[in-house]
Image: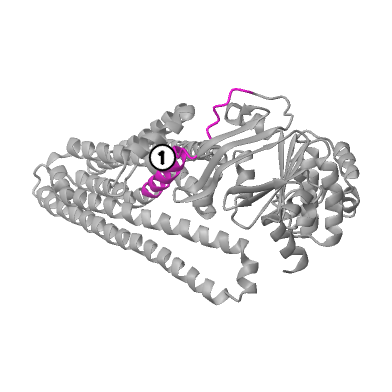
């Protein structure tokens, strides 16, 4: 969907308007109120004409009084409908963005990890927050108001011709220039707003990334360099906004000049004919002065309306592109497993993150139920990739992975993952209580959690926290030490009672005391369940039933610790370097 060169993309608008369907009653009611407002507003100039020509000049004081009362009543009605219109348009906009945001977040949750590898998080935050808010204004400040304005313009012109066709024709002499100016403005603003949204996303991405990595910036004294980069992006954002302001600043004076020109022509020609008692009355001239202001006011406001509408359309286009993205793991499985024994088999598995870089090559091995398997190898050998594939975070390039003899693509994704649990080196915790981070708000009660913590020796450290299990650990667990964060992930895994447990470098960044607690937890966790352990510290995997040794995505050795040492191969070399300093 490419709308780069269009002043207005009706395909994007049509798709956005589909979200109006659940609220169509309110939508059409709001449209109706905008039309009624148009009728009420143009009634005033006609009443003014009547008051001057038929009351003031005719000395009809009763008619003048009645006309004033009617105008006051109409103003009251106009105020009521104005309230209904503003509330209705805003209500529709807020409900639509709630639905859009739910759909968008649901879509993002389904994306495979490869999408997040290639997409800056700040850009997704922009789509989910500021872009969605801009879409709300399509309804609250954009399209519904524009419908009312267009109706007001049409009915104002119609009333002009009804009152005096000669004066109406003079007024419309400036309209060709006005239409050309409006078309130019629309096209220019579309491109300007696309630039603005691009730099908003770039700013969000930059800020989000640098706030998360602030410790790295400060440790390596990169404050000045990163500030310089930020200033460059911020300057580009400023220039994009100034560009849109420049177009806006040109359009408004053009409309004002054309409005003044139309007004001058009406007063000049109308005044001459009224003075000569021809086909123009003074009441008609006053009515036309009011009507010209009413006619050009919505045109002047079109600049604001179109700003809002264009910003919303650009945001809509971006959001819809994410909704159209098909980067997700295909969940075509029909088998739902109530339990998994834990037998895993890789059959000639090949995988690459990019076409030119093969990560796993013709990989085959078996893991039997209840075994503890360790995977070792140099950085980039494919250890973590194996874990990602078992969890179906990525799709295979070719080959098969069998779980209990079943091709795991035939198993429902949710059914597969609920029997697995992962403890990572890079711990992620939510800004919530200890309890909710352990259970992820599932149905386990507090006593069950405490019993599980006691079983693996972690209850003591949790009860030392203020409010223990209800202690809020802060963003990403910032109020806890690295070791405490790691221990919570072990408890989370234990509580989920997985059939297959995966430990990815889970002890590589903790102190020796915490590591002792972790080893106690590991012994409990791995008992009677299939366990896969990735570790740089070879001391942590010597008890493994089998060790798989990888090199450049290929399985080069397998066996237990003693068998691999006796072979004198790659494992022996890794062990010697780590423990003997050779």
Q: Which residue corresponds to the image point at 48% horizontal and 70% vertical from the top-left? A: 229
The N terminus lies in quadrant:
top left
Residue 226 % position (x, y) = 53, 71
Vertical placement of residue 175 versus 236, above or below: above
User: How many marks overall?
Assistant: 1
Looking at the image, residue 479 lies above or below residue 80: below
Q: Quadrant of the C terminus?
A: bottom right
Q: Position of residue 250 (x, y in %)?
A: 27, 61
Q: Residue 294: x and y, percent?
A: 29, 46
Q: Is residue 65 left or right of residue 184?
A: right
Residue 333 in sight in this render: yes
Q: Is residue 451 left or right of residue 429?
A: right
Circle 1 is placed at which residue position?
75
The residue lying toward the viewer, choosing from 459 and 516, is: 516
Which of the 4 image quarters holds residue 3? top left
Question: Is disc 1 placed on a helix, strand or loop?
Answer: helix
Q: Residue at x 53, y 44 (%)?
A: 351
Q: Is residue 325 magenta?
A: yes
> Colour scheme in the image?
one colour
- Work out whether residue 480 can be spotted: no
Q: Is residue 139 magenta?
A: no
Query: Residue drawn 32% across and 49% down?
Result: 302
Horizontal and vertical percent for residue 521?
A: 84, 47
Label 1 crowd (10 A; few <14 / some 14-19 / many >=20): some
Tell me where the magenta segment starts and ends, as one range.
Answer: 309-335
């Amino acid at each position: 969907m490419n709308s780069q060169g269009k002043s207005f993309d009706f395909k994007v608008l049509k798709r956005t308007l589909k979200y109006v369907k659940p609220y169509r009653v309110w939508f059409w009611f709001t449209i109706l109120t905008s039309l009624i407002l148009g009728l009420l507003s143009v009634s005033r100039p006609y009443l003014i004409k009547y008051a001057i020509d038929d009351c003031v000049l005719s000395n009809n004081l009763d008619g003048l009084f009645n006309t004033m009362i009617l105008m006051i009543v109409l103003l009251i009605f106009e105020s009521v409908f104005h309230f209904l219109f503003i509330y209705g348009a805003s209500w529709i906009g807020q409900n639509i963005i709630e639905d859009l945001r739910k759909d968008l977040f649901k879509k993002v949750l389904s994306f495979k990890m490869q999408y997040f590898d290639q997409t800056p998080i700040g850009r997704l935050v922009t789509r989910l927050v500021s872009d969605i808010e801009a879409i709300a204004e399509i309804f609250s400040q954009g399209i519904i108001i524009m419908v009312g304005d267009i109706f007001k313009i049409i009915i104002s012109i119609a009333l002009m011709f009804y009152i005096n066709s000669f004066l109406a024709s003079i007024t419309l002499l400036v309209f060709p220039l006005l239409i050309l100016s409006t078309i130019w403005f629309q096209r220019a603003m579309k491109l300007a707003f696309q630039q603005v949204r691009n730099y908003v996303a770039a700013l969000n991405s930059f800020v989000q990334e640098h706030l998360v990595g602030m410790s790295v910036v400060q440790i390596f004294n990169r404050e000045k360099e990163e500030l310089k980069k930020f200033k460059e992006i911020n300057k580009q954002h400023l220039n994009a906004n100034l560009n849109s302001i420049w177009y806006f600043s040109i359009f408004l004076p053009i409309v004002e000049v054309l409005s003044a020109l139309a007004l001058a022509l009406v007063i000049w020609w109308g005044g001459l004919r009224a003075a000569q008692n021809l086909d123009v009355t003074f009441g008609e001239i006053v009515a036309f002065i009011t009507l010209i202001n009413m006619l050009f006011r919505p045109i002047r406001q079109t600049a604001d309306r179109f700003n809002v509408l264009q910003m919303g359309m650009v945001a809509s286009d971006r959001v819809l592109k994410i909704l159209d993205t098909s980067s997700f793991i295909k969940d075509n499985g029909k088998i739902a497993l109530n339990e998994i024994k834990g037998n895993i088999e890789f059959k000639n598995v090949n995988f690459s993150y990019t076409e030119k870089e093969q990560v796993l090559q013709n990989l085959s091995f078996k893991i039997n139920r209840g075994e503890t398997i360790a995977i070792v190898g140099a950085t980039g050998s494919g250890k973590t990739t194996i874990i990602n594939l078992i969890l179906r975070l990525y799709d295979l390039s070719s080959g098969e992975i069998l779980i209990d003899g079943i091709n795991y693509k035939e198993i429902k994704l949710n059914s597969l993952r609920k029997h697995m649990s992962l403890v990572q080196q890079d711990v992620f915790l939510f800004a919530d209580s200890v309890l909710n981070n352990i259970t992820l708000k599932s149905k386990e009660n507090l006593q069950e959690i405490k019993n599980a913590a006691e079983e693996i020796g972690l209850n003591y450290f949790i009860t030392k926290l203020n409010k223990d299990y209800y202690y809020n650990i802060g963003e990403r667990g910032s109020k806890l030490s690295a070791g405490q964060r790691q221990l919570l992930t072990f408890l989370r895994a234990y509580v989920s009672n997985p059939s297959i447990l995966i430990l990815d470098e889970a002890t590589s960044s903790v102190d020796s005391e915490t590591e002792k607690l972790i080893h106690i937890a590991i012994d409990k966790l791995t008992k009677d369940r299939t366990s896969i352990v990735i570790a740089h510290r070879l001391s942590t995997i010597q008890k493994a039933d089998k060790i798989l040794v990888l090199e450049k995505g290929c399985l080069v050795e397998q066996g237990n610790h003693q068998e691999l040492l006796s072979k004198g191969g790659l494992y022996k070399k890794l062990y010697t370097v780590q423990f003997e300093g050779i």
